[in-house]
Image: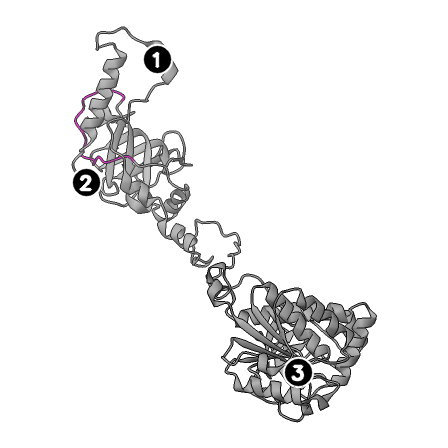
Amino acid sequence: MASDWLGSVVSINCGLTLGVYQGEVSSVDRASQTISLKEPYHNGIRCPLPEVTFSAMDIKELKILDIQNAVNKPSSGLGASTEASSGPTGRHSQTNRSTHPHVTSSSSHTSTAPITILRRAPTAPSNSRGAAQATSRKNCVRNGSTGGPMRPKDDECFGDGTDEDLDTDFDFEGNLALFDKAAVFSKIDGTSSHSSRPQHHSTQAEQKPVSYRHDENILEVKPVIYRQITVPQHGGKDYCTDSGLVVPSVPYELYKRLLAAAERWGLSLERRLETIGVCASQMTLTLLGGPNRLTPKNVHQRPTVVLLCGPHIQGAQGISCGRHLANHEVEVILFLPNFVKMQESVTTEVNLYSKTSVKQVASIKDLPASPIDLVINCLDCHENPLLREQSWYQSAADWANQNRAPVLTIDPPVSEQPQTVEAKWTLSLGLPLPLAERESKVYLCDIGIPKMVFQEVGIRYLSPFGCKFVIPLHPA
């Protein structure tokens, strides 16, 4: 009876360690409970050995794929099982030869000894009947048992053996055993290393890409140089910006040399007045509430600003600021006393200001007695500190101190005496002067002096303004 199975194609599953073998049965020994396969395949790869011998104790599952001599044959005592797919490599065959050298029989084709697999086998050949029925149906179709003529052309076109495995079960467990899930998941997670990977994976060096968190910056930036401005004559006081850049103060003599050099290169007084007026008006509009206050739907609550100006360049800067505020629909009231002779720049700014249809007064009595939104103080002058002794100056300063509105002072002079008008904000131009310690917040305005002009007077300058034209300064 054992000779009836010679020539049949079977699949033998020897477990996860040794894998799956397929081949043609060359001998079956019932006495020693062994079976031999010639020209075997191990996990889908041709074995280097011409014949492999298995013991019944080695076989976990056995499946008959094709019966050559008969259709319905009683199954042997060897177990039947599901079919397994191809595996990674044939390395296990070499390992099995070195680990299990016991030989049970020899092949008639070669002198190489077959290997022996040390595993146990189940008893019942559960799937042998299904394989026989599938082969029987295939033979019936080929012989024309369905009543139709034979179709050799179909067989030539589609080939033989296409229906052999339609009724067989797929070996899911065997295929999962061939899939190294740990190595794949460790590669996905990026946690595997060359030392911890299995030996059957590639050992080529793989550079792991650098990963960043969502709160990390992937751009390499140069460190911030906190002192980017150096001056030949220090004013004795340092300020710093919000980003930590140090801005030193300069004495008024160096400041005058800087403005004179800028005028020689074309930055005239008229250009400087216009730039200061724009920057000061932008700061004022922000202090007044910006877009929350100045909207077309809020015409009944327009802010009111009073300008206190003297007959000098600082007064002209304030008038330029008032003109830009008036163009933005701010109610501006200009206080400028009547003088017999004023500087040309002041006269020019007054003429432009008069075209805005806003109010201009020469007496303190004409200023509003009720609180307003903001007072801009431009009464002081760098060149003539004696203006503080005049009556119009004292009366304007008293009115500003008595009014509850906050005060913005533009370009205040350096003085050892306290400021006559208590200001909440102070706006310096270009570089700050060493102002006296007080509670007002200091701001710095960019008036457009080029970098080479700073170098001409000995100042190494890198702009601290960034994307803004007015920045706050803090005591360093």
Q: Residues within 10 Å of mark 3 (few under 14, many from 20)?
A: many
Q: Which residue is mark 1?
A: 154
Q: Main secondary structure of the magenta part?
A: loop
The residue type indicated by label 3 comes to: Leu
Task: Give me the disc on residue 227.
Answer: none
Q: CA distance from mark 2 to mark 3?
A: 109 Å
Q: Residues within 10 Å of mark 2 (few under 14, many from 20)?
A: some
Position of 198 compared to 334: left or right? Answer: left
**Residues at discs 1 and 3 in contact (Cβ within 8 Å):** no
Q: Which residue is mark 3?
A: 379
**2 or 3: tag closer to the N-terminus:** 2
Q: Which residue is mark 2?
A: 122
Q: Residues within 10 Å of mark 1 (few under 14, many from 20)?
A: few
Q: CA distance from mark 1 to mark 3?
A: 110 Å
| Of residues 317 and 71, the one drawn nearer to the viewer in this rendering | 317
| Of residues 342 and 427, the one drawn nearer to the viewer in this rendering | 342
Q: Nearer the viewer, mark 2 or mark 1?
A: 1
Label 3 sits on a secondary structure element that is loop
State which quadrant residue 26 falls in. Answer: top left
**Magenta span of residues:** 68-83
Label 1 sits on a secondary structure element that is helix
Point out the residue furthest to the top here: 149
